[in-house]
Image (cartoon, coloured by chain):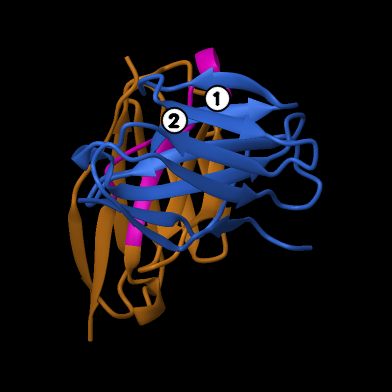
Chain colours: A blue, B orange
Amino acid sequence: ETGVTQSPTHLIKTRGQQVTLRCSSQSGHNTVSWYQQALGQGPQFIFQYYREEENGRGNFPPRFSGLQFPNYSSELNVNALELDDSALYLCASSFIGGTYNEQFFGPGTRLTVL
Amino acid sequence: GEDVEQSLFLSVREGDSSVINCTYTDSSSTYLYWYKQEPGAGLQLLTYIFSNMDMKQDQRLTVLLNKKDKHLSLRIADTQTGDSAIYFCAESPYSSASKIIFGSGTRLSIRP
């Protein structure tokens, strides 16, 4: 059973650019969630995708968007990057229908915006 | 509202017990969690407790839930150097089962 993987590991962008982060869900999972973790903070929920549809969204602007593919892999897209977007982006997969909403986290992508 | 608060740092001697405390605001939360994050790694679920439980024990870990005071604690018995990490308290609100709300994390350091 493979775990949650994310790519790339690190990324450096400049303000105003666009970025795409990728995530492969754990085998058997049908749901993917994305979180932003700023330095010294806990993860903040961005959104969740279930069956290729957005299934809940946190307090993030529309320039944060996502996709979930039929194989349950996912992308997080951020347009018009701002300096405050510098953070660790975590992807988590889970199975809706499970008993306690356990979300399995990947190692994250560290994004630096200059 | 949805908010989770926890102290930032805790230092304990190796072999002692560590107790990490957390308060949360959403009384409708169905599940409460403790996650561990080591440097350069993602989040690892340590344990969880359902909101209708008072206590849960899992090997060296004991979780206590005081629902009246909205207080959650994690006790790690016989703390080892490998327990050094950041520990996050988190809740899953009933109103939005898709998301998990995390605290800011408690950095646990172990003294020899």
State whether residue B65 appears in this view.
no
Residue at image mark 1? B30
Q: CA distance from mark 2 to mark 1?
A: 20 Å
- Rendering quarter of residue B26: top left
Give coordinates of residue B52: x percent, y percent.
Answer: 56, 26
Is B79 part of what is drawn in magenta?
no
Q: Which residues are magenta?
A: B86-105
- Rendering quarter of residue B91: top left
Q: Secondary structure at mark 1?
A: loop
Residue at image mark 2? A46
Give coordinates of residue A71: x percent, y percent.
Answer: 79, 42
Q: Residue at x 27, y 43 (%)?
A: B104
- Rendering quarter of residue A110: bottom left
When the figure is inspected, residue A41 is found, relative to residue A110, above or below; the finding is above
Q: Chain of mark 2?
A: A
Q: Which amino acid type is marked by label 1?
A: Thr
Does residue A6 appear to the left or right of A31 in the view shown? left
Q: Nearer the viewer, residue B104 or A73?
A: A73
Q: Which amino acid type is marked by label 2?
A: Ile
